[in-house]
Amino acid sequence: MTTTSSQRYVPTTDETRTRDTLSHVLEVVHLRGDQIHRCVHSENFTVEVPAGVRALHIAERGDIVIRTHGKEPIELGPGELVLLPHGHAHTIENAVPVLPRTETRWLFGTFTLDDVAAQRLLSVLPDFVELRPTQSPPVEWLEVSSRLLSEEVNDPRPGSSVMVSRILDLLFVQILRAWARADGSNGGWLTAAMDPRIGQALEAVHNDPSRNWSIDELATLSTLSRSSFAERFSRLVGQTPGAYITERRLDRAAELLVQTTEPVGTIAVIVGYESDAAFSRAFRRRFDASPLNWRKSNSHNH
């Protein structure tokens, strides 16, 4: 007779990791892939996209040109994409005169974000983020994601809107990763989040901004000396650890003010302030408004 013993499954350390910094930020800004459209033109064209539309364009056939006011135009060939993360007004047009019996075709995706949070946390991004299959390091996922989106447009089936939303979410994250890793990008916290040392400290701060973090604690998490940590953090993030922690506390307070009905004094304590007056002064410096006025002005967005 064979007997089997039952064992309780215990997650490993890797499986119970807290949210990383980029995941936390994307949750805070409520990133959601919205819609995808295929645009097809068999003659010369200009398509105008108004301000407020956070757009992704993926060229499929023919070349297109993306223009925004005061910026150099971006030309895309088949398989190339551009993300406009800030929702700037722009136009799309054919790059060369369209010949008879040919067509220009591209995918046009949109995203929704919490405008107030996104303005603060995604301000490190440029007006355009371009990706091309030929760049280094290679971006194999771009072709796969584009093909999946194309299939959902060609043959929408039950669950298609959810599929499109998830694929757009994945594209957004992959684009941010690729841009932050690119040589010469000045991505502040986003570039630092990709750093194997400083990323550990950022993750800890984002998961518990109210904690009274010391430089020594964060340096230990990053497996760096105190001086090396402070220098590397400031160089990558663009501000000192103390200033960054203060901003994250106040950002968290701003979220709580519009997402809950907790009194201002309670929120001050939650984000790590012992004095209501100190919290209000710091909040006003960051947002140019008192906590109560901020709540009144932004609660309609939620």
Image (cartoon, helix red, strand yellow):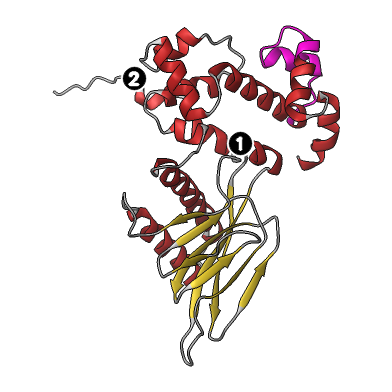
Left or right: where does residue 286 sit relative to residue 164? right
- Give the residue drawn at x 67%, y 69%: 48
Say which amino acid is labelled 2. Answer: Arg
- Give the residue drawn at x 42%, y 12%: 227
Residue bounds of the magenta highlight = 259-278
Q: Is residue 20 visible?
A: no
Residue beneath label 1, please? 121
Residue beneath label 2, please? 8
The quadrant in which residue 195 appears is top left
Of residues 95 and 220, the one drawn nearer to the viewer in this rendering: 95
Task: Locate the N terminus by quadrant.
Answer: top left
The quadrant in which residue 15 appears is top left
Task: Locate the C terminus by quadrant.
Answer: top right
Say which amino acid is labelled 1. Answer: Leu
Earlier in the chain: of badge 2 and badge 1, it is 2
268 falls in the magenta region: yes
Left or right: where does residue 9 sit relative to residue 150? left
Residue 108 in the image: x percent, y percent?
55, 65
Instruction: Tell me if residue 6 comes above or below residue 211 in the rendering.
Output: below
Give the SS element for disc 1: helix
Residue most extreme to the bottom = 100
